[in-house]
Image (cartoon, rainbow, N blue to C red):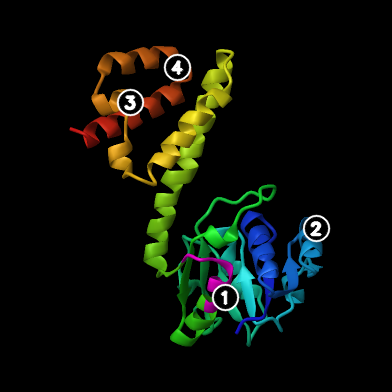
């Protein structure tokens, strides 16, 4: 049973994961950040030792969790000096084979959620996708995951990549559309708060019906006149291009 952890990283994912582990009774031995000030605040919250050199990570922990940018994971693995702890990363887009040649007790613990340091979330509702180098390691990671979340699923590297792509559409692109909406409204002296009930209902609806059936709007109806009028109101050419591309995709979906 995993009772202790060391964490490499102090960003959004690392912050929420460290707190969830701590609240689940897991001892956080150390937290690494290349800038000590970046992890000292988090380390204090979970009674961990902050370190600014990967070599100083407490490798006596049962698990070492790498939670850094995707393109930095391989370099971190190369720098680790460990021969006992299970090593996992938290990325949706990086294969488990990043550990090949460095550890045979390794895996992935991928939380599918959008995290911001200054927002508290109910971690028990965060889907966790698990992969491991063998059945025994999987059982240990799965046990830990189930102490953190009520939604734990086995997913290999290819399935995680699919989840990650879908999540970009469902979260990152949608949020960017919110940002575009806010900019258009501000240019015309209107408040983004006017859209909040619409956003809430759009989100609530897909708990009961599929996104396909929930679609409404001029592109769904192929109302060319309305769409052309909208384009005349949009000043930013990039926003026009996005509107045109999304409208085309919706119209073709419902032909």
Above or below 197: residue 146:
below
Location of the C terminus (image quadrant): top left
Q: Residue furthest left?
A: 255
Among the two numbered marks 1 and 4 on one chain, the one whose residue lies closer to the N terminus = 1
Q: CA distance from mark 3 to mark 1?
A: 44 Å
Q: CA distance from mark 1 to mark 4?
A: 49 Å
Q: Nearer the viewer, mark 2 or mark 1?
A: 1
Asked which quadrant contains residue 188, the reply is: top right
Which residue corresponds to mark 4? Answer: 234
Residue 196 place in picture, x, y as percent: 53, 30
Q: CA distance from mark 2 to mark 1?
A: 24 Å
Count of number-bearing discs: 4
Residue position marked by numbered label 2 in the rendering: 41
Mark identifier at residue 144: 1
What range is drawn magenta here? 143-151
Image height of 187 relative to 109, above or below: above
Residue 217's disc is: 3
In the picture, the disc for residue 225 is none
């Amino acid at each position: 049973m995993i009772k202790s952890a060391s964490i490499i990283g102090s960003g959004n994912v690392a912050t929420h994961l460290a707190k969830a582990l701590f609240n689940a009774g897991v001892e956080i031995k150390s937290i690494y950040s290349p800038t000590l000030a970046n992890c000292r605040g988090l380390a204090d919250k979970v009674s961990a030792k902050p370190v600014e050199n990967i070599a100083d990570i407490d490798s006596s922990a049962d698990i070492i969790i790498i939670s850094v940018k995707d393109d930095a994971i391989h370099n971190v693995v190369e720098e680790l000096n460990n021969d006992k702890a299970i090593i996992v990363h938290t990325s949706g887009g990086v294969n488990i084979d990043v550990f090949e040649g460095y550890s045979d007790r390794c895996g992935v613990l991928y939380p599918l959620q959008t995290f911001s340091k200054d927002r508290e979330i109910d971690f028990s509702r965060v889907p966790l996708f698990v992969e491991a180098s063998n059945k025994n390691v999987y059982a240990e990671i799965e046990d830990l995951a189930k102490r953190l979340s009520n939604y734990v699923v086995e997913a290999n590297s290819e399935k995680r990549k699919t989840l990650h792509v879908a999540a970009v559409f469902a979260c990152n692109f949608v949020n960017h559309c919110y940002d575009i909406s806010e900019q258009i409204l501000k240019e015309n002296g209107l408040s983004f708060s006017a859209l909040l009930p619409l956003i809430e209902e759009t989100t609530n609806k897909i708990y009961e019906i599929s996104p396909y059936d929930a679609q409404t709007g001029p592109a769904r109806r192929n109302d060319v006149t309305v769409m052309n009028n909208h384009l005349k109101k949009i000043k930013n050419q990039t926003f026009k291009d996005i509107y045109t591309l999304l409208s085309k995709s919706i119209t073709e979906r419902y032909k």
